[in-house]
Amino acid sequence: MADHVQSLAQLENLCKQLYETTDTTTRLQAEKALVEFTNSPDCLSKCQLLLERGSSSYSQLLAATCLTKLVSRTNNPLPLEQRIDIRNYVLNYLATRPKLATFVTQALIQLYARITKLGWFDCQKDDYVFRNAITDVTRFLQDSVEYCIIGVTILSQLTNEINQADTTHPLTKHRKIASSFRDSSLFDIFTLSCNLLKQASGKNLNLNDESQHGLLMQLLKLTHNCLNFDFIGTSTDESSDDLCTVQIPTSWRSAVLSCLVQIASVRRSLFNNAERAKFLSHLVDGVKRILENPQSLSDPNNYHEFCRLLARLKSNYQLGELVKVENYPDVIRLIANFTVTSLQHWEFAPNSVHYLLSLWQRLAASVPYVKATEPHMLETYTPEVTKAYITSRLESVHIILRDGLEDPLEDTGLVQQQLDQLSTIGRCEYEKTCALLVQLFDQSAQSYQELLQSASASPMDIAVQEGRLTWLVYIIGAVIGGRVSFASTDEQDAMDGELVCRVLQLMNLTDSRLAQAGNEKLELAMLSFFEQFRKIYIGDQVQKSSKLYRRLSEVLGLNDETMVLSVFIGKVKSALECPRIPRAWVWASVALEPSSEDYLKDNFSSQPNHHQLEVLGSFSVRKLVKLSAVQFMLNNHTSEHFSFLGINNQSNLTDMRCRTTFYTALGRLLMVDLGEDEDQYEQFMLPLTAAFEAVAQMFSTNSFNEQEAKRTLVGLVRDLRGIAFAFNAKTSFMMLFEWIYPSYMPILQRAIELWYHDPACTTPVLKLMAELVHNRSQRLQFDVSSPNGILLFRETSKMITMYGNRILTLGEVPKDQVYALKLKGISICFSMLKAALSGSYVNFGVFRLYGDDALENALQTFIKLLLSIPHSDLLDYPKLSQSYYSLLEVLTQDHMNFIASLEPHVIMYILSSISEGLTALDTMVCTGCCSCLDHIVTYLFKQLSRSTKKRTTPLNRESDCFLHIMQQHPAMIQQMLSTVLNIIIFEDCRNQWSMSRPLLGLILLNEKQYFSDLRNSIVNSQPPEKQQAMHLCFENLMEGIERNLLTKNRDRFTQNLSAFRREVNDSMKNSTYGVNSNDMMS
């Protein structure tokens, strides 16, 4: 007993040190000791003692947290009886101690919710012992307000817990629990919540009373959690909530809906037309009352939720329905006034503006389609909203500069999002929008010009006018781009011409002072404007008689799109030449890129939105090449003319990424007239040849300037990768290949050898090599007498082996740096090896035939790298998981003999990774795992079939060993059979065809025992009246299926599986089902 008392005292002291001390060292020591306590064998008993005898709230919190971890662990779980005891103990503890600290009560409720969720399918004497939540809380609800709050909080936390997936348990298990909870308990909880709210509303509540206010808040939270439940397993992303709908089951029709934001999202099909109109009328009337008494909207949270409610009015209802609401004229007036006021107060809750603009964007877009006779009045209010947005942005510039506030223009993603919405709003009553923009632009441009001519002008005044002009250029580009949303007239094209003329005149002014005092944000706005103009007014579909071009001809002498293109390219060239605005290099490079969206998404996602700046469509490339500015860039792409191509010791190596984009554009422009002209190609490559020779010269000496060598090499390989990406034709790519191999390949290998630990150097080199071995558009086609395919793979193998062996010597890498320092390079190596193995330009059989170890070295390095990666990391990092599973798919398809020859622990690692990938959220990963599994199962089935036949030639050693390993570890294949079948039956299976391919092989391999037991388990888990139907479903699944994996048989099974899934879903629709968790969820 004395030991227990002493131990408890020590634990309480550690808790006090953890939560109260200000000394960092003491707190870290306490944390370490408490972590050891949670992993100790006697943790459970000591937690109970802490709850019983602990004198501090912190010790009670520790006990509750430790118990939650114990019941959540997947390995060595607690026995059922013990979990029941803990559940009952927690309920009694809460019932006898209503005055616990809030955070202790919350932790204990979380413990109850976790036990209930994880034990949802656990039975004791044919009774689901963890499904009596409402019964458990009844005694709380019948007591005082304090107890009632505890009861409601238990139900609220339980609903939220079951709705949320966690990473420690399979997603399939989560969905199965959530579906069963939805069907058996959720509606009862929701009804109880509504009834309690009714009772509360019928009483004179004193909201100044803390306990009564707390009860009402918890009831509202419970109701919200019920409506926020993921009814159909779509896992809606909150960031896209303006498009989501609440999929309330039809059986909930009679319930009273109480949470406003969720109410507005109720699916339309829940009502008939008359009911929907009545429901919408009540909803709009409630919005009207809030707008007439907006005092509570001064709270930012209330304001944000109300903006979301307004946005959902239009996302779920048509304008024709809204105008028929009785109070529509008053409501649209109030909403317009509210929006205008909100936009004018731009510094208050800026993240809520998106929802208001979304509402008006949808309203404006609906104007051409509304058929109702009632007036929509948008022609009156939409211009007010447009004016409020434009003027508020301009007025904010001075305040932001004066007070040093964060500039919204820095967040290009947010700006682009708002401009996309404004592009539609502004085109409604476009005459008014255009007149306002012309007026404001002329005022700012005149003031700006006067300031530039004045010797006494202050830099602040100039910066203010530049900021205002930046916003105006962005907005003009947006409204021109919005032309695509509306049927345009000649008069509107003429208005566009007025706006375009002004922007181009401003551009002439800013270009004249670019070298001395260029404004980066204004330059980016110009490039954004060019993008919008290009989409609308440059292309074969544009009428050359457009009034826009007439206006451009009258004012600026630009008669056609070729002359406009010349102006655009001149602007791009000047931006690239300017050393003062480094961020514009990237944007200007992209502006040159003819059609690079996919490439940029893959390779430059960290640069916000610049993949949208495709100023030139691919159809314009032939016109571009003839322009003098383009010819200048093709002939003078050196640091002398473009400073970003030089060595800048002040910038990071990662800042050179824009060079890849730049050279991709130049490469595509070069290809237009290149043909087979090797002299022209060599002339173009002269600057890069000089750079390679410079690096080679450095490497040849014992001592050299490492920083200079790094910067030269990184810039060079980024340039080459851009060219390699652009050269997607055989003729041009062969010129590049013969230029780089064999002369310069040793330099790349040497760089990897020297700087393997520096990802800023290795990543560009590895990506270049991955691009060189990628047989895009069949560009890697060597002559039949050429050994170049084999030689290229040798270089690939050498680089993978060198990098892999050296990166493994790094040792322990901090978790927050492991991707950047290690996993990213490994991922690129996987992609490189996959591209080489699947390129169809190498016969890999010759390597073993002639004793060449290049293939073996590459594959063995892959295995070593793979084993250095924890399973969790394979799925935690999307790019790594995609490259790994893509490579594994190729290996299982074409190199299964290598997989079969691996050590047992390696094979089990690979199979385990496939098993985990089957339940991945990324459909591409899941589909790849299905393909890998199909290849493995097919190989295994064929080898088993051969082993049972009398043959003169025995199985090879690899096949024999692989069969032996699989026979020694049948659980892995059985587990994957269970997983695949579970996904098909219980999940929203989006790749059913892919799932069906390995499933037949899995069934045939386990047909005699495991599949039969699994089938019986599923059938027996159904209610008695459904068991016969489920048994028939399985019988129909295998009807007409032969015991082979021929294509015809597989196709028949796939058809049967589709019918099986439909029949099973129909059978289970109206039943609450549960499958034995040991079979289906282990």
Image (cartoon, rainbow, N blue to C red):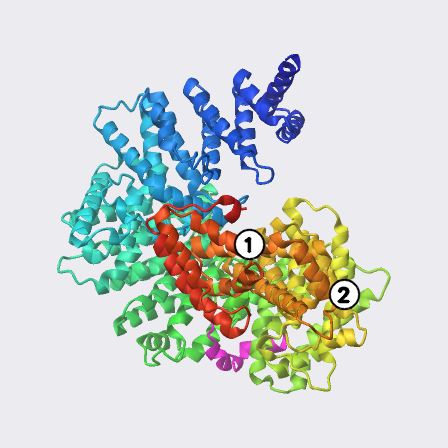
Instruction: Tell me where residue 252 appears, x and y as whole percent.
Output: 27, 44
Q: Secondary structure at mark 1?
A: helix
Amino acid beneath label 1: Tyr
Residue 464, compared with residue 538, is above or below; it is: above
Instruction: Tell me where residue 295 appears, x and y as whole percent.
Output: 27, 34
Q: Is residue 677 left or right of residue 149?
A: right
Residue 687, compared with residue 967, is above or below; it is: below
Q: Is residue 215 left or right of residue 591?
A: left
Residue 1035 versus residue 1002: which sits nearer the camera?
A: 1035
Residue found 25% across the figure and 54% down from its top: 269
* Residue assigned mark 2: 857
Q: Is residue 808 left or right of residue 55?
A: right
Write down the quadrant of residue 285 in the picture: top left
Amino acid beneath label 2: Asn
Residue 781 versus residue 545: which sits nearer the camera?
A: 781
Residue 734, compared with residue 264, is above or below; it is: below
Write down the quadrant of residue 438 in the picture: bottom left
Instruction: Tell me where residue 51 appears, x and y as whole percent.
Output: 53, 20
Residue found 78% across the figure and 76% down from its top: 849
Magenta span of residues: 615-639
Instruction: Tell me where residue 796 appears, x and y as whole percent.
Output: 72, 69
Residue found 38% across the figure and 28% down from its top: 136
Pick whichever of labels 1 and 2 is earlier in the sequence.
2
Q: Which one is closest to the eye, mark 1 or mark 2? A: 1
* Residue assigned mark 1: 1010
In this orientation, does residue 30 appear?
yes
The quarter of the rendered structure image containing the N terminus is top right
- The question of residue 631 being in magenta is answered with yes
- The question of residue 961 being in magenta is answered with no
